[in-house]
Image (cartoon, rainbow, N blue to C red):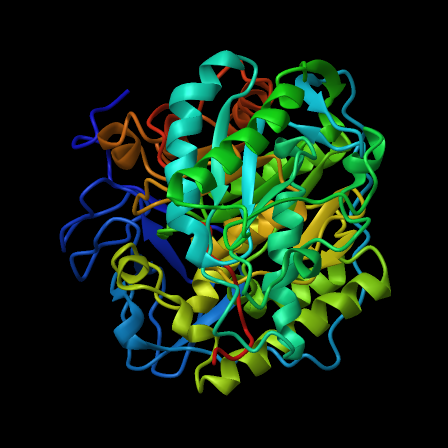
Amino acid sequence: MADANTRPPLYIRIHAADNVAIVANDGGLKAGTAFDDGLVLVDTVPQGHKVALVDLAEGDAIRRYNVVIGYALKALPRGSWVHERVMRMPVAPELDGLPIATVKPPALPPLEGYTFEGYRNADGSVGTRNILAITQTVQCVAGVTEFAVQRIKAELLPKYPNVDDVVALEHSYGCGVAIDAPDAIVPIRTLRNISLNPNFGGEVMVVSLGCEKLQPERLLPPGTIPIADQRGAPADDLDVVCLQDDAHVGFMSMIDSVMRQAETHLTRLNKRRRETVPASELVVGVQCGGSDAFSGVTANPAVGFCTDLLVRAGATVMFSEVTEVRDGIDQLTSRAATPEVADAMIREMAWYDAYLDKGRVDRSANTTPGNKKGGLSNIVEKAMGSIVKSGSAPITGVLAPGEKLAHKGLIYAATPASDFICGTLQLAAGMNLHVFTTGRGTPYGLAEVPVIKVATRSDLARRWHDLMDVNAGRIADGEASIEDIGWEMFRLMLDVASGRKKTWAEHWKLHNALVLFNPAPVT
Ligand code: CA
Protein backbone atom coordinates (compact mmCIF):
# COMPACT_ATOMS: atom_id res chain seq x y z
CA MET A 1 0.00 0.00 0.00
CA ALA A 2 1.43 3.37 -1.02
CA ASP A 3 1.66 6.13 1.55
CA ALA A 4 -1.09 8.73 1.16
CA ASN A 5 1.40 11.32 -0.09
CA THR A 6 3.19 9.08 -2.56
CA ARG A 7 0.11 7.62 -4.23
CA PRO A 8 0.03 8.15 -7.98
CA PRO A 9 -2.38 10.89 -9.12
CA LEU A 10 -5.89 9.48 -9.23
CA TYR A 11 -9.24 10.81 -10.34
CA ILE A 12 -12.62 9.12 -9.93
CA ARG A 13 -15.20 9.27 -12.69
CA ILE A 14 -18.62 7.96 -11.65
CA HIS A 15 -20.18 7.30 -15.05
CA ALA A 16 -18.67 6.75 -18.49
CA ALA A 17 -20.73 9.65 -19.88
CA ASP A 18 -19.38 12.13 -17.30
CA ASN A 19 -17.15 14.95 -18.58
CA VAL A 20 -15.78 15.77 -15.10
CA ALA A 21 -14.17 13.59 -12.42
CA ILE A 22 -13.00 14.27 -8.88
CA VAL A 23 -9.41 14.31 -7.66
CA ALA A 24 -8.98 11.52 -5.10
CA ASN A 25 -5.55 12.24 -3.60
CA ASP A 26 -5.23 13.56 -0.05
CA GLY A 27 -4.34 17.26 -0.15
CA GLY A 28 -5.36 17.59 -3.80
CA LEU A 29 -3.02 17.86 -6.80
CA LYS A 30 -0.90 20.69 -8.16
CA ALA A 31 -1.23 22.32 -11.59
CA GLY A 32 0.90 20.43 -14.07
CA THR A 33 0.20 17.01 -12.51
CA ALA A 34 -0.04 14.40 -15.27
CA PHE A 35 -2.30 11.34 -14.99
CA ASP A 36 -1.60 7.97 -16.59
CA ASP A 37 -4.15 8.64 -19.36
CA GLY A 38 -2.40 11.87 -20.42
CA LEU A 39 -4.71 14.30 -18.62
CA VAL A 40 -2.66 17.23 -17.27
CA LEU A 41 -4.06 19.60 -14.64
CA VAL A 42 -4.27 23.20 -15.84
CA ASP A 43 -5.12 24.39 -12.31
CA THR A 44 -4.33 23.15 -8.83
CA VAL A 45 -7.34 21.06 -7.80
CA PRO A 46 -8.21 20.37 -4.13
CA GLN A 47 -9.13 16.84 -3.02
CA GLY A 48 -12.70 15.95 -3.89
CA HIS A 49 -12.98 18.76 -6.43
CA LYS A 50 -13.80 18.34 -10.09
CA VAL A 51 -11.47 18.41 -13.06
CA ALA A 52 -12.65 18.82 -16.68
CA LEU A 53 -11.91 15.64 -18.65
CA VAL A 54 -12.61 17.34 -22.00
CA ASP A 55 -12.51 20.90 -23.34
CA LEU A 56 -15.78 22.55 -22.22
CA ALA A 57 -17.09 25.57 -24.14
CA GLU A 58 -19.11 28.31 -22.47
CA GLY A 59 -22.67 27.03 -21.94
CA ASP A 60 -21.71 23.35 -22.20
CA ALA A 61 -23.46 20.92 -19.88
CA ILE A 62 -21.30 19.58 -17.05
CA ARG A 63 -22.15 15.95 -16.38
CA ARG A 64 -21.52 13.93 -13.23
CA TYR A 65 -23.46 10.77 -12.23
CA ASN A 66 -24.57 10.95 -15.90
CA VAL A 67 -26.72 13.92 -14.85
CA VAL A 68 -26.32 17.59 -15.80
CA ILE A 69 -25.10 19.23 -12.61
CA GLY A 70 -24.48 22.63 -14.24
CA TYR A 71 -23.49 24.67 -17.28
CA ALA A 72 -20.02 26.16 -17.88
CA LEU A 73 -20.02 29.95 -17.38
CA LYS A 74 -16.85 30.23 -19.49
CA ALA A 75 -14.61 28.03 -21.58
CA LEU A 76 -12.97 25.39 -19.35
CA PRO A 77 -10.12 23.60 -21.12
CA ARG A 78 -9.39 19.96 -20.33
CA GLY A 79 -7.59 19.74 -16.96
CA SER A 80 -9.33 22.84 -15.51
CA TRP A 81 -10.67 23.01 -11.96
CA VAL A 82 -14.49 22.99 -12.23
CA HIS A 83 -16.07 24.61 -9.17
CA GLU A 84 -19.24 26.45 -8.22
CA ARG A 85 -18.03 29.86 -9.46
CA VAL A 86 -17.53 28.68 -13.02
CA MET A 87 -20.86 26.90 -13.42
CA ARG A 88 -24.56 27.77 -13.45
CA MET A 89 -27.03 25.49 -11.68
CA PRO A 90 -29.88 23.86 -13.66
CA VAL A 91 -33.48 24.53 -12.66
CA ALA A 92 -35.26 21.88 -10.57
CA PRO A 93 -37.14 19.21 -12.52
CA GLU A 94 -40.86 19.87 -13.03
CA LEU A 95 -43.22 17.76 -10.93
CA ASP A 96 -45.53 17.17 -13.91
CA GLY A 97 -45.02 14.42 -16.40
CA LEU A 98 -42.55 12.43 -14.31
CA PRO A 99 -41.96 8.75 -15.08
CA ILE A 100 -44.20 6.80 -12.70
CA ALA A 101 -43.20 3.32 -11.54
CA THR A 102 -41.54 2.69 -14.93
CA VAL A 103 -38.41 0.98 -13.63
CA LYS A 104 -38.89 -2.55 -12.41
CA PRO A 105 -35.59 -3.29 -10.68
CA PRO A 106 -34.60 -6.95 -10.94
CA ALA A 107 -36.02 -8.79 -7.92
CA LEU A 108 -33.35 -9.01 -5.24
CA PRO A 109 -32.92 -12.53 -3.86
CA PRO A 110 -34.03 -12.84 -0.23
CA LEU A 111 -31.24 -12.74 2.34
CA GLU A 112 -32.04 -15.29 5.01
CA GLY A 113 -30.55 -16.47 8.27
CA TYR A 114 -29.40 -13.15 9.72
CA THR A 115 -30.57 -12.28 13.22
CA PHE A 116 -29.90 -9.91 16.08
CA GLU A 117 -30.73 -9.79 19.77
CA GLY A 118 -33.49 -7.26 20.33
CA TYR A 119 -36.25 -6.29 22.75
CA ARG A 120 -39.58 -7.47 21.39
CA ASN A 121 -42.43 -5.06 22.26
CA ALA A 122 -46.09 -5.79 22.79
CA ASP A 123 -47.00 -3.94 19.58
CA GLY A 124 -44.67 -6.20 17.57
CA SER A 125 -41.90 -3.64 17.14
CA VAL A 126 -38.35 -4.43 18.32
CA GLY A 127 -36.03 -2.20 20.31
CA THR A 128 -32.25 -2.17 20.05
CA ARG A 129 -31.85 -0.42 23.41
CA ASN A 130 -33.86 -0.42 26.63
CA ILE A 131 -34.43 3.21 27.56
CA LEU A 132 -36.84 5.07 29.84
CA ALA A 133 -37.94 8.14 27.89
CA ILE A 134 -39.74 10.96 29.67
CA THR A 135 -42.07 12.81 27.36
CA GLN A 136 -42.69 16.52 27.94
CA THR A 137 -45.62 18.56 26.75
CA VAL A 138 -43.86 21.91 26.87
CA GLN A 139 -40.36 23.37 27.16
CA CYS A 140 -41.27 25.03 30.50
CA VAL A 141 -40.80 21.70 32.31
CA ALA A 142 -37.41 20.89 30.73
CA GLY A 143 -35.28 22.11 33.63
CA VAL A 144 -37.33 20.24 36.23
CA THR A 145 -37.31 17.07 34.14
CA GLU A 146 -33.56 17.26 33.59
CA PHE A 147 -33.01 17.73 37.33
CA ALA A 148 -35.12 14.62 37.96
CA VAL A 149 -33.30 12.67 35.22
CA GLN A 150 -29.93 13.38 36.85
CA ARG A 151 -31.25 12.02 40.15
CA ILE A 152 -32.88 9.02 38.46
CA LYS A 153 -29.54 8.20 36.82
CA ALA A 154 -27.64 8.53 40.09
CA GLU A 155 -30.12 6.96 42.51
CA LEU A 156 -32.49 4.64 40.60
CA LEU A 157 -30.74 3.38 37.48
CA PRO A 158 -28.12 1.32 39.39
CA LYS A 159 -31.03 -0.70 40.84
CA TYR A 160 -32.30 -1.59 37.33
CA PRO A 161 -29.26 -2.99 35.52
CA ASN A 162 -31.20 -4.08 32.42
CA VAL A 163 -32.20 -0.50 31.64
CA ASP A 164 -29.64 1.27 29.45
CA ASP A 165 -30.49 4.88 30.10
CA VAL A 166 -33.03 7.54 31.06
CA VAL A 167 -33.69 10.24 28.50
CA ALA A 168 -35.75 13.41 28.70
CA LEU A 169 -37.44 14.09 25.36
CA GLU A 170 -36.78 17.81 25.48
CA HIS A 171 -38.23 20.11 22.83
CA SER A 172 -39.41 23.67 22.38
CA TYR A 173 -43.04 23.11 21.40
CA GLY A 174 -46.15 23.60 23.49
CA CYS A 175 -46.99 27.30 23.80
CA GLY A 176 -46.46 30.41 21.70
CA VAL A 177 -47.50 28.29 18.72
CA ALA A 178 -50.52 28.35 16.42
CA ILE A 179 -51.63 24.95 17.64
CA ASP A 180 -54.77 24.85 15.46
CA ALA A 181 -52.89 25.70 12.24
CA PRO A 182 -53.13 22.78 9.80
CA ASP A 183 -49.35 22.25 9.79
CA ALA A 184 -49.23 22.00 13.61
CA ILE A 185 -50.04 18.34 13.08
CA VAL A 186 -46.38 17.86 12.10
CA PRO A 187 -44.70 18.71 15.44
CA ILE A 188 -47.54 17.19 17.46
CA ARG A 189 -47.50 13.81 15.76
CA THR A 190 -43.70 13.87 15.82
CA LEU A 191 -43.70 14.14 19.62
CA ARG A 192 -46.45 11.55 19.94
CA ASN A 193 -44.69 9.05 17.73
CA ILE A 194 -41.27 9.59 19.32
CA SER A 195 -42.83 8.62 22.67
CA LEU A 196 -43.77 5.33 21.00
CA ASN A 197 -40.30 4.60 19.57
CA PRO A 198 -39.47 0.87 19.91
CA ASN A 199 -36.47 1.61 22.14
CA PHE A 200 -38.76 2.89 24.91
CA GLY A 201 -40.73 -0.33 25.36
CA GLY A 202 -44.14 1.34 25.36
CA GLU A 203 -43.46 2.81 28.82
CA VAL A 204 -44.77 6.31 28.20
CA MET A 205 -44.60 8.81 31.03
CA VAL A 206 -45.33 12.49 30.60
CA VAL A 207 -44.25 15.58 32.52
CA SER A 208 -46.70 18.43 31.97
CA LEU A 209 -46.86 21.98 33.28
CA GLY A 210 -50.65 22.27 33.39
CA CYS A 211 -51.49 25.44 31.48
CA GLU A 212 -49.82 24.59 28.15
CA LYS A 213 -51.54 24.49 24.78
CA LEU A 214 -50.36 20.98 24.04
CA GLN A 215 -52.30 19.22 26.81
CA PRO A 216 -51.28 15.61 27.54
CA GLU A 217 -54.59 14.28 26.16
CA ARG A 218 -53.97 16.15 22.93
CA LEU A 219 -50.42 14.83 22.67
CA LEU A 220 -51.38 11.23 23.46
CA PRO A 221 -55.12 10.71 22.98
CA PRO A 222 -56.70 7.57 24.48
CA GLY A 223 -55.73 4.46 22.58
CA THR A 224 -52.41 5.70 21.19
CA ILE A 225 -50.24 3.64 23.54
CA PRO A 226 -50.73 0.04 22.48
CA ILE A 227 -48.71 -1.42 25.32
CA ALA A 228 -50.96 0.13 27.98
CA ASP A 229 -53.72 -2.23 26.84
CA GLN A 230 -51.27 -5.13 26.84
CA ARG A 231 -50.45 -4.83 30.50
CA GLY A 232 -54.08 -4.52 31.45
CA ALA A 233 -54.14 -0.79 32.08
CA PRO A 234 -57.03 1.11 30.57
CA ALA A 235 -56.04 2.72 27.28
CA ASP A 236 -56.71 6.22 28.60
CA ASP A 237 -54.60 5.66 31.71
CA LEU A 238 -51.89 8.12 30.70
CA ASP A 239 -49.15 8.55 33.28
CA VAL A 240 -48.80 12.31 33.72
CA VAL A 241 -46.91 14.28 36.36
CA CYS A 242 -48.44 17.78 36.28
CA LEU A 243 -46.21 20.38 37.93
CA GLN A 244 -49.06 22.84 38.60
CA ASP A 245 -51.04 20.15 40.40
CA ASP A 246 -52.23 21.41 43.83
CA ALA A 247 -50.57 18.40 45.42
CA HIS A 248 -47.15 19.80 44.59
CA VAL A 249 -45.79 21.98 47.37
CA GLY A 250 -42.23 23.00 46.67
CA PHE A 251 -39.81 21.93 43.97
CA MET A 252 -38.77 18.69 45.68
CA SER A 253 -42.33 17.40 45.69
CA MET A 254 -42.29 17.69 41.89
CA ILE A 255 -38.99 15.83 41.70
CA ASP A 256 -40.34 13.16 44.05
CA SER A 257 -43.40 12.69 41.82
CA VAL A 258 -41.29 12.30 38.67
CA MET A 259 -38.95 9.85 40.41
CA ARG A 260 -41.80 7.80 41.87
CA GLN A 261 -43.49 7.45 38.49
CA ALA A 262 -40.15 6.76 36.80
CA GLU A 263 -39.59 3.87 39.18
CA THR A 264 -42.80 2.11 38.15
CA HIS A 265 -41.68 2.25 34.52
CA LEU A 266 -38.10 1.24 35.34
CA THR A 267 -39.42 -1.81 37.18
CA ARG A 268 -41.22 -2.99 34.05
CA LEU A 269 -38.42 -2.03 31.64
CA ASN A 270 -35.94 -3.92 33.80
CA LYS A 271 -37.84 -7.15 33.10
CA ARG A 272 -37.30 -6.82 29.35
CA ARG A 273 -34.82 -9.33 27.93
CA ARG A 274 -33.16 -9.46 24.57
CA GLU A 275 -34.29 -12.30 22.35
CA THR A 276 -33.15 -13.53 18.95
CA VAL A 277 -35.15 -11.83 16.22
CA PRO A 278 -34.73 -11.84 12.43
CA ALA A 279 -32.80 -9.03 10.77
CA SER A 280 -36.14 -8.02 9.25
CA GLU A 281 -36.90 -6.24 12.56
CA LEU A 282 -34.26 -3.61 11.88
CA VAL A 283 -35.67 -0.19 11.12
CA VAL A 284 -32.72 1.80 9.81
CA GLY A 285 -32.80 5.54 9.18
CA VAL A 286 -30.04 6.71 6.83
CA GLN A 287 -28.91 10.26 6.33
CA CYS A 288 -25.79 12.27 5.60
CA GLY A 289 -24.35 15.46 7.01
CA GLY A 290 -21.22 17.50 6.44
CA SER A 291 -21.09 15.97 2.98
CA ASP A 292 -18.25 16.26 0.49
CA ALA A 293 -17.64 15.02 -3.03
CA PHE A 294 -16.58 11.65 -1.63
CA SER A 295 -19.97 11.12 0.05
CA GLY A 296 -21.43 10.15 -3.29
CA VAL A 297 -18.40 8.04 -4.27
CA THR A 298 -17.60 5.99 -1.18
CA ALA A 299 -19.86 6.14 1.90
CA ASN A 300 -23.25 6.70 0.29
CA PRO A 301 -22.88 3.98 -2.38
CA ALA A 302 -21.73 1.58 0.37
CA VAL A 303 -24.82 2.55 2.41
CA GLY A 304 -26.85 1.97 -0.76
CA PHE A 305 -25.41 -1.54 -1.11
CA CYS A 306 -26.19 -2.15 2.57
CA THR A 307 -29.72 -0.77 2.05
CA ASP A 308 -30.23 -3.46 -0.58
CA LEU A 309 -28.93 -6.12 1.85
CA LEU A 310 -31.36 -4.90 4.52
CA VAL A 311 -34.31 -4.84 2.13
CA ARG A 312 -33.38 -8.33 0.95
CA ALA A 313 -33.40 -9.42 4.61
CA GLY A 314 -36.93 -8.05 4.93
CA ALA A 315 -35.93 -5.03 7.04
CA THR A 316 -37.03 -1.43 6.77
CA VAL A 317 -34.78 1.35 5.52
CA MET A 318 -35.82 5.00 5.49
CA PHE A 319 -34.08 7.61 3.39
CA SER A 320 -35.08 11.24 3.71
CA GLU A 321 -33.86 14.82 3.18
CA VAL A 322 -36.25 16.37 0.64
CA THR A 323 -33.87 19.02 -0.75
CA GLU A 324 -31.29 16.29 -1.38
CA VAL A 325 -33.56 14.19 -3.55
CA ARG A 326 -35.56 16.99 -5.22
CA ASP A 327 -33.23 17.15 -8.23
CA GLY A 328 -33.40 13.40 -8.70
CA ILE A 329 -37.15 13.05 -8.25
CA ASP A 330 -37.49 11.42 -11.67
CA GLN A 331 -35.16 8.62 -10.54
CA LEU A 332 -37.33 8.04 -7.47
CA THR A 333 -40.79 8.22 -9.05
CA SER A 334 -39.62 5.76 -11.68
CA ARG A 335 -38.43 3.40 -8.90
CA ALA A 336 -41.71 3.62 -6.98
CA ALA A 337 -43.31 0.21 -6.52
CA THR A 338 -46.76 1.57 -7.39
CA PRO A 339 -48.25 4.75 -8.90
CA GLU A 340 -49.66 5.58 -5.44
CA VAL A 341 -46.15 5.62 -3.95
CA ALA A 342 -44.90 7.85 -6.79
CA ASP A 343 -47.86 10.21 -6.29
CA ALA A 344 -47.16 10.42 -2.56
CA MET A 345 -43.55 11.27 -3.30
CA ILE A 346 -44.56 14.03 -5.73
CA ARG A 347 -47.02 15.35 -3.12
CA GLU A 348 -44.23 15.62 -0.54
CA MET A 349 -41.93 17.40 -3.06
CA ALA A 350 -44.69 19.86 -4.00
CA TRP A 351 -45.47 20.54 -0.33
CA TYR A 352 -41.78 21.24 0.31
CA ASP A 353 -41.38 23.43 -2.79
CA ALA A 354 -44.29 25.55 -1.47
CA TYR A 355 -42.80 25.60 2.04
CA LEU A 356 -39.44 26.87 0.72
CA ASP A 357 -41.18 29.29 -1.62
CA LYS A 358 -42.98 30.87 1.34
CA GLY A 359 -39.54 31.72 2.71
CA ARG A 360 -38.48 32.99 -0.76
CA VAL A 361 -35.75 30.39 -1.21
CA ASP A 362 -35.46 27.13 -3.09
CA ARG A 363 -33.63 23.83 -2.66
CA SER A 364 -30.32 25.53 -3.50
CA ALA A 365 -30.31 27.04 0.02
CA ASN A 366 -29.28 23.55 1.20
CA THR A 367 -25.54 23.57 0.43
CA THR A 368 -23.08 24.79 3.07
CA PRO A 369 -19.64 26.43 2.78
CA GLY A 370 -18.20 23.08 3.93
CA ASN A 371 -20.00 21.20 1.14
CA LYS A 372 -18.47 23.58 -1.41
CA LYS A 373 -15.02 23.39 0.16
CA GLY A 374 -15.39 19.60 -0.05
CA GLY A 375 -16.04 19.82 -3.78
CA LEU A 376 -19.84 19.83 -3.99
CA SER A 377 -20.60 22.75 -6.27
CA ASN A 378 -24.38 22.85 -5.86
CA ILE A 379 -27.46 21.00 -4.66
CA VAL A 380 -27.83 19.03 -7.88
CA GLU A 381 -24.40 17.46 -7.43
CA LYS A 382 -25.05 16.96 -3.70
CA ALA A 383 -28.43 15.34 -4.40
CA MET A 384 -27.01 12.83 -6.88
CA GLY A 385 -24.50 11.71 -4.27
CA SER A 386 -27.17 11.61 -1.57
CA ILE A 387 -29.78 9.54 -3.42
CA VAL A 388 -27.41 6.59 -3.83
CA LYS A 389 -27.98 5.81 -0.13
CA SER A 390 -31.35 4.41 -1.22
CA GLY A 391 -29.73 1.53 -3.13
CA SER A 392 -31.62 -0.07 -5.97
CA ALA A 393 -34.75 -1.66 -4.48
CA PRO A 394 -38.25 -0.48 -5.39
CA ILE A 395 -39.59 2.25 -3.08
CA THR A 396 -42.58 0.77 -1.31
CA GLY A 397 -43.83 3.56 0.94
CA VAL A 398 -43.78 7.28 1.71
CA LEU A 399 -44.12 9.01 5.07
CA ALA A 400 -45.04 12.66 5.58
CA PRO A 401 -42.96 14.42 8.29
CA GLY A 402 -43.63 12.95 11.74
CA GLU A 403 -45.68 9.99 10.55
CA LYS A 404 -45.10 6.50 11.93
CA LEU A 405 -44.12 3.54 9.74
CA ALA A 406 -46.95 1.22 8.81
CA HIS A 407 -45.03 -1.39 6.83
CA LYS A 408 -41.55 -2.69 5.98
CA GLY A 409 -39.33 -2.21 2.95
CA LEU A 410 -37.59 0.79 1.40
CA ILE A 411 -39.45 3.89 2.57
CA TYR A 412 -39.08 7.50 1.57
CA ALA A 413 -39.60 9.48 4.81
CA ALA A 414 -39.93 13.13 3.78
CA THR A 415 -37.88 15.33 6.13
CA PRO A 416 -35.75 18.44 5.95
CA ALA A 417 -32.06 17.69 5.39
CA SER A 418 -31.14 19.34 8.72
CA ASP A 419 -29.35 16.54 10.57
CA PHE A 420 -31.22 17.05 13.83
CA ILE A 421 -34.67 17.48 12.31
CA CYS A 422 -34.16 14.51 10.00
CA GLY A 423 -32.99 12.34 12.90
CA THR A 424 -35.89 13.50 15.06
CA LEU A 425 -38.44 12.67 12.35
CA GLN A 426 -36.85 9.28 11.66
CA LEU A 427 -37.09 8.56 15.40
CA ALA A 428 -40.78 9.40 15.22
CA ALA A 429 -41.17 7.06 12.26
CA GLY A 430 -39.86 4.27 14.49
CA MET A 431 -36.19 3.82 13.61
CA ASN A 432 -34.20 1.57 15.92
CA LEU A 433 -30.80 2.15 14.27
CA HIS A 434 -29.34 5.22 12.59
CA VAL A 435 -26.63 5.36 9.92
CA PHE A 436 -24.95 8.67 9.24
CA THR A 437 -22.34 9.37 6.56
CA THR A 438 -20.02 12.36 6.72
CA GLY A 439 -17.16 13.76 4.66
CA ARG A 440 -16.31 17.00 6.40
CA GLY A 441 -16.84 15.28 9.78
CA THR A 442 -19.54 15.68 12.42
CA PRO A 443 -19.67 14.23 15.94
CA TYR A 444 -23.49 13.81 15.62
CA GLY A 445 -25.20 11.38 17.99
CA LEU A 446 -28.61 10.72 19.54
CA ALA A 447 -29.50 9.55 23.05
CA GLU A 448 -32.53 7.61 21.82
CA VAL A 449 -30.97 5.27 19.27
CA PRO A 450 -27.44 4.12 18.31
CA VAL A 451 -25.86 6.15 15.50
CA ILE A 452 -23.29 4.42 13.25
CA LYS A 453 -21.10 7.03 11.62
CA VAL A 454 -19.39 6.40 8.29
CA ALA A 455 -16.43 8.48 7.08
CA THR A 456 -16.21 9.14 3.34
CA ARG A 457 -12.42 9.65 3.37
CA SER A 458 -9.55 7.80 5.06
CA ASP A 459 -8.01 11.13 6.10
CA LEU A 460 -11.10 11.91 8.19
CA ALA A 461 -11.27 8.34 9.53
CA ARG A 462 -7.64 8.58 10.64
CA ARG A 463 -7.98 11.96 12.35
CA TRP A 464 -11.37 11.10 13.92
CA HIS A 465 -10.42 7.51 14.73
CA ASP A 466 -12.49 7.53 17.94
CA LEU A 467 -15.58 9.14 16.41
CA MET A 468 -16.05 7.31 13.10
CA ASP A 469 -17.36 3.72 13.17
CA VAL A 470 -16.71 2.79 9.53
CA ASN A 471 -14.08 4.04 7.07
CA ALA A 472 -15.59 4.02 3.58
CA GLY A 473 -12.57 6.01 2.38
CA ARG A 474 -10.87 2.67 1.78
CA ILE A 475 -13.01 2.46 -1.37
CA ALA A 476 -11.27 5.53 -2.85
CA ASP A 477 -7.91 4.17 -1.66
CA GLY A 478 -8.51 0.99 -3.65
CA GLU A 479 -8.31 -1.14 -0.49
CA ALA A 480 -11.94 -2.24 -0.30
CA SER A 481 -14.92 -2.43 -2.63
CA ILE A 482 -18.31 -0.81 -2.18
CA GLU A 483 -19.64 -4.32 -1.53
CA ASP A 484 -16.98 -5.00 1.14
CA ILE A 485 -17.89 -1.86 3.07
CA GLY A 486 -21.62 -2.51 2.58
CA TRP A 487 -21.27 -5.97 4.13
CA GLU A 488 -19.09 -4.58 6.93
CA MET A 489 -21.85 -2.08 7.74
CA PHE A 490 -24.53 -4.77 7.63
CA ARG A 491 -22.66 -6.97 10.12
CA LEU A 492 -21.84 -3.98 12.32
CA MET A 493 -25.53 -3.07 12.38
CA LEU A 494 -26.44 -6.52 13.69
CA ASP A 495 -23.75 -6.23 16.40
CA VAL A 496 -24.77 -2.71 17.41
CA ALA A 497 -28.48 -3.56 17.34
CA SER A 498 -27.76 -6.54 19.62
CA GLY A 499 -25.87 -4.38 22.11
CA ARG A 500 -22.71 -6.44 21.50
CA LYS A 501 -20.97 -3.33 20.23
CA LYS A 502 -21.36 0.33 21.06
CA THR A 503 -20.91 3.08 18.52
CA TRP A 504 -18.38 5.80 19.27
CA ALA A 505 -21.18 8.32 19.80
CA GLU A 506 -22.65 5.96 22.42
CA HIS A 507 -19.26 5.40 24.00
CA TRP A 508 -18.69 9.13 24.50
CA LYS A 509 -22.41 9.85 25.11
CA LEU A 510 -22.56 12.44 22.32
CA HIS A 511 -26.20 13.43 22.26
CA ASN A 512 -27.63 16.07 20.00
CA ALA A 513 -30.93 17.75 20.84
CA LEU A 514 -34.20 16.65 19.33
CA VAL A 515 -35.31 19.39 16.95
CA LEU A 516 -38.95 19.47 15.93
CA PHE A 517 -40.01 20.45 12.45
CA ASN A 518 -42.68 23.09 12.95
CA PRO A 519 -43.86 24.48 9.61
CA ALA A 520 -46.81 26.20 11.37
CA PRO A 521 -46.71 29.83 12.57
CA VAL A 522 -45.36 30.76 15.98
CA THR A 523 -47.36 33.36 17.90
CA1 CA B 1 -28.67 15.60 6.88
Q: 17 above or below 128?
A: below
Report x, y in % for residue 380.
47, 67
Report x, y in % for residue 505.
38, 31
Query: In the picture provided, is 156 more to the left or to the right than 111?
Result: left
Q: Residue at image x 47%, y 79%?
A: 362
Q: Residue at image x 48%, y 16%?
A: 501
> In terms of depth relative to the viewer, which is nearer, 255 or 390?
255
Q: Is residue 451 visible?
A: yes
Q: 365 above or below 480?
A: below
Give the position of the N terminus as an image quadrant.
Answer: top left
Query: In the picture provided, is 338 more to the left or to the right than 504?
Result: right
> In terms of depth relative to the viewer, which is nearer, 120 or 305?
120
Q: Residue at image x 56%, y 64%?
A: 322
Query: In the picture provided, is 253 more to the left or to the right than 275?
Result: left
Q: 465 above or below 207?
A: above
Q: How many marks?
A: 0
Q: Quadrant of residue 25?
A: top left
Report x, y in % for residue 101.
81, 62
Report x, y in % for residue 227.
78, 35
> In terms of depth relative to the viewer, which is nearer, 139 or 301?
139
Q: Is residue 13 visible?
A: no
Q: Residue at image x 75%, y 19%?
A: 277
